[in-house]
Amino acid sequence: MEFLTEYGLFLAKVVTVVVALLVIVGFIVANREQLKDRIQGHIVVTSLNDRYEQMKETLLEAVMEKHEFAHRHKQMAKEKKAREKALLKKHKAEKKQKPAEKVQRKDLEPTDTPLPEQGEADAEAGDTQSRAIIKAKPEGERVRLFVLHFDGDIKASALAQLREEVTAILQVAEPGDEVVVCLESPGGVVANYGLAASQLARVRSAGIQLTIAVDKVAASGGYMMACVADRILAAPFAMLGSIGVLAQLPNFNRFLKRYDVDFELFTAGEYKRTVTMFGENTEQGKEKFQSDLEEIHALFQHFVSEYRPQLDVAKVSTGEVWFGQRAVELGLVDELKTSDEYLTSRASDADLYQVEYKERKNIAKKMGLAAQSGVESALMRLFSRLEAWRHQAQ
């Protein structure tokens, strides 16, 4: 048993040295990467209609008789060809109609110069008519749905991708189109999630319908993002809410005093630092810190009420979390429906495009990520073995 214990300690030392070296290498690689210019990523667009159709065809091919599937395939090809032919005919008719409209407008132009007031009124009327034309989709044209995925952590790390994706979509989206965000987040840093919510607000400001689908959780900062939507969908057991603010930190002041360690903190400004991890926190500092949290909470409530005025914010801003059905009753959610259910139901009358921003990674960054993954894996294995040896010794 002593041999195993000594061998375990020796192995732990070796692993510790290796892990330390890997950490240093990973740190160096990551810092070198940050010093270089950021490599631009690219937008990847996937047609969900095609994906759903391929899944359907694969399954039908497996369950149908060969001659039935072949007949169905031929029939679908004929229908597709007929649709393309009808669409081409429609485009040709529209092209012929445009020159006639131009001639008609030219004949209707007044010969006399209009008065300034009349000119301004006509210009305003024309501008209103122009906006109306832009907002109305041509009859028979399919709506486009742009689908995004936001998987949030405490730092809202997916924010960088979200900014690029929203920017790309707003270059082509038109009123009548829709943006669907499949959102999953337990919340995190206020500033980061506030900026993420502002990115979604850009969609609404552009006049594009915004739908948020929550399958698992949208709490705290996650709900701050979700409330921006025109409509919120949630799975029956999804968790939503947590409209509150949390801050916690350990304090080692008594530990330092026990070992006669002094901690000196120098600040300029009465409330530059209210509470610390190593200093002795005063009642005045704690009260100021709590006051800051209350102020952030008030801003959070105001933000939610601005986008969901029908919601009784005072009732739901207790920091509690509710499941889907109860969230609907309280007004936190508009409808119980999973993201899969919603997207597949829309595939028949809309064109669905999944939009992803993927950042290119060079060799240095890949090495840094590999080193990080290796360190995490080595630590997990070390802890598992030490735990096993501990149980064997007992």
Image (cartoon, grey):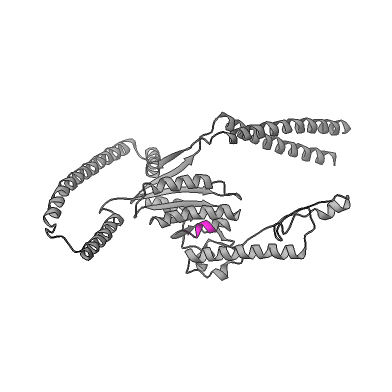
Asked whether residue 217 is in view, the answer is no
Out of 79 and 265, give the one closest to the viewer: 265
* Left or right: residue 159 compared with residue 93: right
Residue for point 70% across, 60% down: 271
Q: Which of the pair 99/139 is nearer the observer?
A: 99
Q: Is residue 93 above or below residue 221?
A: above
Task: From the viewer's perspective, tell me whether residue 306 is left or right of residue 138.
Answer: right
Relative depth, front residue between 380 and 187: 187
Q: Position of residue 120 (x, y in %)?
A: 24, 62
Residue 57 higher or lower than 346, as above or below: above
- Image quadrant holding the N terminus, namely top right
> Horizontal and vertical percent for residue 262?
84, 51
Q: Is residue 52 above or below residue 124?
A: above
Q: Give yes or no for residue 4 being in the magenta stretch.
A: no
| Residue nearer the viewer, 176 or 388 | 176
Q: Which residues are magenta?
A: 224-228
